[in-house]
Amino acid sequence: MAFPHRHPLRLIALAALTVAAAVGACERATTPIGPPAAVASVDVTPATATVQAGQTVQLSATAKDVNGLPLSGRTMTWASSNTSVATVSNAGLVSAVTPGSATITATSEGTSGTSSVAVSNIPVASVDVTPATATVQAGQTMQLTATPKDANGAALSGRAVSWSSSNTSVATVSNAGVVSAVTLGSATITATSEGKSGTSSITVTNIPVVSVDVTPATATVQAGQTVQLTATPKDANGAALSGRAVSWSSSNTSVATVSSSGLVSGVTPGSATIMATSEGKSGTASVTVTQVPVATVSVSPATATVQAGQTVQLIATPKDANGATLSGRTVTWSSSNTSVATVSSSGLVSGVTPGSATITATSEGKSGTSSITVTNIPVATVSVSPPTASIQQGQTVQLTATLKDASGNTLSGRTVTWSSSNISVATVSSSGLVSAVTPGSATVTAASEGKTGTASITVTAPTGGSQFRHVFVVTEENTDYADVIGSSAMPYLNGLAQQYGLATQYYANTHPSIGNYFELATGQIITNNDSYSTIVTVDNIVRQLLAAAKTWKSYAEDLPSVGYTGGDVGNYARKHNVFALLSDVVNDATQVRNLVPFSQFGTDLANGTLPDFVNIVPNLCNDAHDCSLATADAWLQSNIDPLIKSATFQQDGLLIIVFDESGGDNTNGGGRIVWVAVSPKSKPGYQSATLYQHQSSLRLILKGLGVTAFPGAAASAPDMGEFFTP
């Protein structure tokens, strides 16, 4: 051979093909030797699966031999371990029923494989509540339905639903969605499932009132008596409705009235229709009022004793034939002797004079009586004020007798007789005015109904001419005696009171301020209006000073200018400087210029040009009206002490420091106040318990300057000469 090794591979391949062909020929001709391969295992895929209830998942099962090779054409059966959770078809299609777990088994020729299937719920996406809106009457119910749905709007069954109300006072809801209407109003009912909610708007209305029954339908009541009516609102079915407002009215309130609770009161005989109304529906009752006749009248007390000037209350009680008291009846009263006792329309008996009278009460022609005896209230004590007085020969002093009963009550209208123990020294008139005759002493007695009181009178010889060269008056404001004397706030004034003269029973005349300032200037109150601006023309201190050729000035702190007569400016108050309201000043171009600012006082003192009479008016702060007592006291020490220490004053001066009125006391008109007299002629440390008022100060001012005519009440005012040595 020429190429022994040229195609060795081709030869090998050819040989192989030959062998294979032979073998193939042999197989087709040979009968099988044994049975098909047995199923050794079954694989189920997927081995685990999760599917929502109502959905499906396809499983596959593969039969395999012992070598793990797939075996085709084998019969496969399917089964579920829990068909309530998941079922499986003959083709391995798993259908999810309810949440839970199930094992799906595929079996072929006795050999099985499994897949674990978990079934979950389809999530709730929304909740529909029907009806979405509803109206229900109070006391009624309504069923709501909640439908949970998935994201595709498909209804989901078997889901838990909870219910709630936004306003349980209006409407409540049960676990089953039954709404119960409670009271008028609105509420939102919410159904919730798996965190998703739906609502229904509920409006609660009243069951309408259709009729109102009033019981009793007719009634008779006596005037002055009552009967209770009852109103029952009802619905269309005649069922009583509770909690409804009912208003009541009477067709004739002069016959019968009715309260808001249906209580009818008989007023006078007659007829009236009583109506009860609720929500526009009404019912009525017919009421007849009759009169209970008066059978007797009893008067209590049946006998009484009353003192003249006093009263006693009688009570008349009309009664029916059974002795029952009748109210609302007219009673008239009369007295058999009105000169002894009178009786008012209300039965108040007033004793007039001692004696007897029968008081009769009459009602509807029937009468009852009471026997009244009137007696006098006996006088127990007689006090005379002032209890002591010192007056100059030729002068007078007014005494006052006060009669009191055993209880200390003042008695008026009693006869008082006056007498003097020594008429050669002092006489007394029937009105208690004492006239000084000659120097000496006398006891003046006031007697009434056997009781007496006395006053000791000292008559001094007339001094002749002026007792003082200069008289000064400083008026402070609105403070009680007890708040000044002994007060640590006013050491300077208390020192003067201890060293010189103090009137311990000095009283202002009135309230408020202005009347007291007028009393000091005119002897009259004139007005109690602090805003008073009318020019006063009555007799006054300036008129009498000018008539006696005396000089005067009023030094007012914070007065705007010389001759200023206008109203209040800053801390200046015209009501404290009534000289600016006297006609003798305002209408005289010369005298009006005696109204000067207080700043001129120091100059006049230093120059020796002070007038005979000086009125000093501190401003509203320094007179204790607006500021403290300590402020007023400091002002006195700073401005008045230099005056007292001056040679002019120490020779024959008189300074009166007085408060215009008390702060909270009305005794004797204006309350107890402080009055201090400072003079080199003062009795050292002298205190008087004689009752004095501002008219006595006016009298002292003029008399001390030698003036003998006194304006107003100063003419008869108690003389204050007791404070000074002759």
Image (spheres, helix red, strand yellow):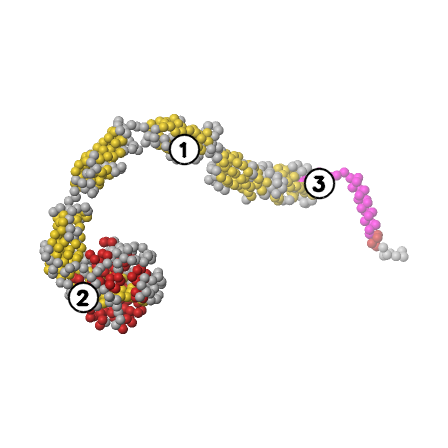
Callout 2 amino acid = Gly
Inter-mark Cα distance, 3 to 1:
103 Å
Q: Residue at x 67, y 43 (%)?
A: 66
Range of the magenta residues? 12-41
Q: Is residue 27 magenta?
A: yes
Secondary structure of the residue carrying numbered label 1: strand
Q: Is residue 621 visible?
A: no
Would residue 564 appear left or right of 393 to someone viewing this image?
Answer: right
Which of pointers 3 and 1 lies earlier in the amino acid sequence? 3
> Does residue 36 sit above or below 566 in this rendering?
above
Q: Residue at x 30, y 54 (%)?
A: 528
How busy is the neighbourhood of tag 2: few (under 14 within 10 Å), some, or many (20 plus)? few
Q: Nearer the viewer, residue 522 or 71?
A: 522
Secondary structure of the residue carrying numbered label 2: loop
Inter-mark Cα distance, 1 to 2:
89 Å
| Residue 426 position in % (x across, y down) | 12, 56
Mark 1–mark 2 CB contact (< 8 Å) = no
* Residue farthest right in this picture: 2
Callout 3 amino acid = Ser
Which of pointers 1 and 2 lies earlier in the amino acid sequence? 1
Q: Is residue 206 visible?
A: yes
| Residue 246 position in % (x across, y down) | 42, 34
Would residue 671 appear left or right of 190 to someone viewing this image?
Answer: left
Residue 547, picture quadrant: bottom left
| Residue 656 position in % (x across, y down) | 23, 64
Would residue 257 appear left or right of 202 to someone viewing this image?
Answer: left
Q: Residue at x 34, y 28 (%)?
A: 269
Residue with the mark numbered 1: 249
Q: Residue at x 47, y 40 (%)?
A: 168
Residue with the mark numbered 3: 72
Residue with the mark numbered 2: 465
**Viewport quadrant of the N terminus:** bottom right
